[in-house]
Image (tube, grey):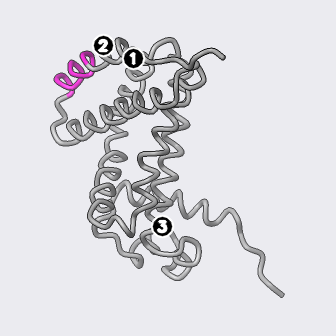
Amino acid sequence: MSRTVDEQRPVELLDAIVGHLITHGVAELSLRPLAKAVGSSPRVLLYYFGSKEEMVVKALARLRERQRATYSQMKADSSDSPSKACRAIWKHMSAPDSEPLFRLFFEAYVLALRHPRRFRHFLHTAIEDWLGFLAAPLCSKGYEQSEARAFATVVLAGFRGFMLDYCASRDRQRLDRALDLWLRGLDAVPLRRLKAK
């Protein structure tokens, strides 16, 4: 008689793994200490997640889902201009409890750039998932997809640059002023709408 697969267990493990990675990072990640920390075994982790690299990619995707859920609400609450939504998102991103999440992201990004074949999926989704998320509201308002994606690229690059600087310097006053200048520019960007048929 076959054992019933506990469908909730991988989800619980993934959430525990995310918590562990936020605290300890990925550069020196080893399966045995990780498994012990999350109440599992290396064999079980490999069974559920395939490999250490795949597990890291899935954990980061899980973290990205949480962030998108939070930022979706902020976008909805500030839908009248890009700068209002971006300012709300920046306030959340630069809060002290968010900093460890971005340190983990940047650490994983560097690792993926060093090993692009092993982390190809992560590199792709780290860009495409966010571009789709950021471009969707503009597309729904009738802007051309290429324009929406270009604008989303500016937003994504801006946030990542600001957060990298913030994690390194913690110079909130300078970055808040730079953000003001950046947001003023975002509101002034002319975007092409789809032509009426």
- Residue depicted at 35% across the width and 50% down the height: 105
Pinpoint residue 179: horizontal percent, then vertical percent: 27, 22
Check disc 2 and report its element: helix, strand or loop. helix
Determine contact: label 2, label 1, CB under 8 Å: yes
What type is the residue that disc 3 sits on? Answer: Met
- Going by the numbered disc 1, the residue's amino acid type is Ser
- Magenta: main secondary structure equals helix
Q: Residue 184, position in %: x, y? A: 30, 13
Q: Residue at x 16, y 23 (%)?
A: 174
Q: What is the three-letter code of the residue carrying label 2? A: Arg
Q: Secondary structure at mark 1?
A: helix
Magenta extent? 172-181
Residue on which the image places disc 1: 83
First in sequence: mark 3 or mark 2? 3
Q: Residues within 10 Å of mark 2 (few under 14, many from 20)?
A: few
Q: CA distance from mark 3 to mark 2?
A: 40 Å
Earlier along the polypeptide chain: callout 2 or callout 1?
1
Quadrant containing the C terminus is: top right
Residue bearing mark 2: 184
Residue sitting at the far right: 1
N-term mark: 3 or 1 = 3
Say which residue label 3 marks. Answer: 55
